[in-house]
Every structure is written in C-alpha cells, then in structure tokens.
Image (spheres, grey):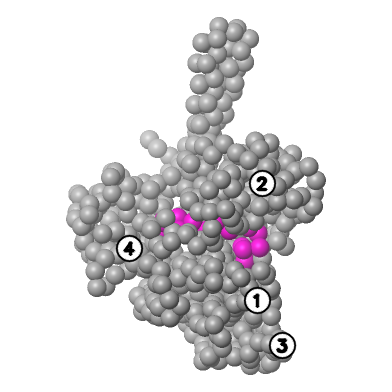
Amino acid sequence: MALFFLVEKGPRPGLQLALQEGRPLILGRGMTVDLPLPAEDSGIALRHAEVLVSPLDVQIHPLPNVGPVFVNGSPIENATRMVAGDSLQVGDTTIRLYSDQGPDSESMIEPIPLSFRDIIESARALRLDSQRRAPTPSGLASENLHCTGCGIAGIVPPRPDLWDAAWLCSACAKERRKPMAGMPARLGHYELLRPIARGGMGVVFEGLDSDTGLHVAIKILRSSGPRAERAAKRFAREQQITMALRHPNIVCCYDIGVWEGSLYIVSEFVPGGDALKYSSLTSPLQQVLWLGADLFRALGYGHDLGIVHRDVKPANLLLCPVAPQGTLRGKLGDYGLAKSRSGVGNPITMSNESGGSLLTIGPEQIEDFVNVGPQGDLYAGAATVFWMLTGDTPLVLPCASSSATFEQKAQAILHPARKRLLDLRGDVPVPVAELIDGLVAVDPSLRQRMHAREVAAAFNAIAARMVDKSTWTGSAPASFEASDHARVLKRSLEAVEFCVRMLERSVERAAKEVREAADTEDNQRMQRALANHESAQADLEQALTQWEGLLDADHGPRG
C-alpha cells in the first residue's frame, strides 16, 4: 500500500507528495528536502519536520526551532502517528494523508484495459472520480471564466480541480467555425470548430463543449494504414495517463471517446501557442527561466508518480496567459510516449524506436527507449531550455540541424562533444549555464543525482534573483514583483542556497584532483590542483557569507 500527501489548502492546492519507505524524509520549503512544500508559504521552515513512513502509517516529528505543526487540528511537539485521512498543517498549508489502496482508492494510475471500450469506461470513471475528489483551492476566484477570444465575462464558474480552464462565447465560436472536409461537425456534445495542427498520428481541432461552453482542444487519432493498431494503443495509453494527472503545469485532459473506430481526446485549450516562439538568442532570459521552472515542475510531478514523459521538446511546452497579470504559465502536454515506471500496462513503443525529438532526447533514450527513466526527461528538459535560449541544439552536428540525417543526429547524441551554452549566449547566469550543460552531457552523473524538482527550484530561484537585481526590464509575474520584498528575499535565499550546493560540489571535485595529483608526484599538477582547490574554497566561503547575510535579513541578526 502506497501513501502520499495531498495539499488541500494553501499556495499550491493539488500538489501531491509521494511517501517512500526506508529512510527519514524531510518536509519543508527548501529546495533540497525530500518533500518540498510551497516556497510562497513563509510560515514553513526550509526544514520543518521529519517524516517516517511504514506500510500502514507515518510518523511526523517537528524539527527544533520551527513554527507550529498541527495534526487533525491539534498542535504537536513530539513524534505523532498519522493514518490515511488525517490532516497535517504547517504554516498556511494544510495537507491530508491518502492511501492508494482499498474501496476509496486514490490511485492515480489503473492497469491499461485490453479493449477500447474498457479503456474508455476506465478513463471516464477516472475523470469523474478525480473531479469528485478534487480539493477546492483556497481563495478560488468567484467570478466566472472570461472568453478566450474577446475577454467578456461568461456564465461558467471556475472549476476547483482546474487551473486555466478556458471559455468561449457564442460569437467567437461562430467566427472560428471552419469545417474540415471528411470530418464531422460534432463529436457528442463537442463541436469541432477548426483544425489547428496536423501530425503523423492525427489532427487537432479547436473545439467547444456545448454543454458547458468550455474552450477545448480535440485530438483525433488517424485510423488508417498498417500501423494504425499500434498507434491507437499508444494514443489510448496517452489518454489513460493524462486523464489522471492534475497539475497547473500539465495540460488537463477532460474526456475520451470514439468516432468511427478512431479514438479522440478532449483537453483544455491553451491559447498562447508553444515554446518555439521563445527559441532564439534574443528570447527574454527571465521568461525562459520561468517557463523552464514550469516544465521541470511538471516533470517532477510525473516522476513522483512513476511516469516518464519521453517526448519533452519546445513544441510540447504550451504557453497559457495568466490573467490579470498577462504573464505566461508553461504547461507540458502530449504524454503520448509516456511510460509509467509503476508497472502500468505493457510498453507500446517498439524496442527499436527512439521516440521523442532527436534534437532533445539523450543517450539513455537512444540506447533503451522503452526502459528510459527520469534521467531521459532531465536531459530533454534541459535541451529544451537550451533550445529556447539559443534556437539551437547542444549537439555538435556536421551540418545544420534541419539538414542532419537521423544517423547523424543519433551519433551526435552518443558523442561526448557538446556546445557550451555560454559560448552561444553570454548573458545566461553561470549557475544556469553550468546546470544545463551538465544535464545535457553524455556523462549521466548529474542527471542521476538530481530530481526534476531541484532543477525547477534552481530556475525559479535564479529568475527571482534577477527581479531583485532589476536585471530584466519586462513585467515580472505578480507573485515576484520587486515591491514584494519578503517573497523576493525568500527566493533569493533559495538561489544562494543552490549556488552554495553547486560550489560545495566544486570544492569536492577540486579536493579529489589534489588527491589524484599527490599520487602522481607531479609537482606542476599538484600546484595547479592546489590553486583550483583554493579558488573553489574562496568562492564557497563568499557564497556562504552572502547566504548568512540573507538569513539575517530574513530572520533578524543572530546573537
């Protein structure tokens, strides 16, 4: 039986935290903890409590010198037992403990059925169950949704389990009606307005839910050709996975159905296009970091559920304008190649396929696509951010990427040579460049050590630090406005903490070089190694001094 925490109230309702047995887990808002809570909640310490997980319950133990911890409304000071259904409150965040077994299962993934009918019924039941169980976010806006086209207020209230649901008025729907030959005008209560994308697996329509007025996207799988059956199975798997996912940075799936033997999926309409529009050397640096943080938050959520995306690329990172600030939220879509590491179903993609985009997939995916783990997503996510910052791939190719053959791209992925981000774009902060370069390296060591949540926290923290230094002239998201000093200070703390962790690793590497040089009895090598170690240690001490200064500003001088 698996246990997990679900945030029911606070800055990030709907956040799910998987609980693993075997070692103590640290709960807090620091970027290096096992169970990261919203950084926006200043009532939560960086390391707030220790969690011990057993098969049937958990023990929660507050750490010294932190704010109060409540279990089922009562304050606790010592280790306290929690069972499924109990609530935990730290700061302004309320969390509930759930189990994924039993008649009231909260399981996010069901085994894939054998028939299309079973798939459809299972997906619909899962969708209805998700809606019924969805927590109501704190402070949910009471006004109705506004039209995506003209902006007028509509008649549809916000959904508590959705973050960016879109509504379309009748006038705007009429303007967008452009029927496609050979396609129906409606699929059940969904109206097909106009085609907006076509690909190898099918066509995507802009659509309207006539029952609710929700603005939707409808993807129809092609049903002809010798590979139709395998493509249909892959598409069905995508639906089963995406129907279960509820996260503000993941495109939400509403429904699944069948039309003349072809499966179709109905999902939220994301009106801002995709991240390809931010793929150049002049793309706004801070906005790319925000979107990169959104991308890795989505991946981290999936990885916690045992789901590997396997097709991360700029075209699959959709952009959702967030009113009223006019900022953008990145939303990861197209889980068509996704694979669950929790034993869900059978692999649908054949073992000789690589899947994904060859310009963003890594060595692990080339060598073993079916069994690729989260490391493959970390590579692809970093390559996507690299592409957004430069309009280029980190691969070293013998010609332009648009002209390179499949074999040339595959060989470049496995070859250790890579372009350095700072060589292409010098305004990228050094910690960001080093992180991205490390994640897209052939050597998988950094990908094996990091979780997607840590990458998201690093991008978020450094972007917030840029607001604090006024190094970006665009409009920052409302939650990071410079006037909000306390919140910027929190983000700055996380940014410096990230730098400290990276510099600690640099000192460790430099110390290893000194030890290796001592074994060679090469005096010049020893002098170089000692100089490198001294420089790394000085950088670390400087970062620690800055960190302590920010801690004093946050909590007051220590005496």
Q: Which residue is mark 1?
A: 203
Q: Quadrant of the C terminus?
A: top left
Tell me which corner region of the image, top left, top right, bottom left or bottom right, holds residue 478: bottom right
Mark 3 or 4 closer to N-term?
A: 4
- The residues bearing labels 4 and 2 have C-alpha atoms spaced at a distance of 45 Å
Camera-near label (4 vs 2) is: 2
- The residues bearing labels 4 and 1 have C-alpha atoms spaced at a distance of 40 Å
Q: Position of residue 10 (x, y in %)?
A: 40, 65
Asked if the residue at tag 3 contacts the one at tag 2, i.e. Cβ–Cβ closer than 8 Å, the answer is no
Residue 315 sits inside the magenta stretch: yes
Q: Which residue is mark 2?
A: 410
- The residues bearing labels 2 and 1 have C-alpha atoms spaced at a distance of 28 Å
- The residues bearing labels 1 and 3 have C-alpha atoms spaced at a distance of 13 Å
Q: Which residue is mark 4?
A: 95
- Span highlighted in magenta in the image: 301-319
- The residues bearing labels 2 and 3 have C-alpha atoms spaced at a distance of 39 Å
Res. 197 visible in picture: yes
Near mark 2 (Cα within 10 A), the count class, few <14, some 14-19 or many ≥20, is many
221 w.r.t. 499: above or below? below
Near mark 4 (Cα within 10 A), the count class, few <14, some 14-19 or many ≥20, is many
Which residue is found at the position 59% from the left and 21% from the top? 532
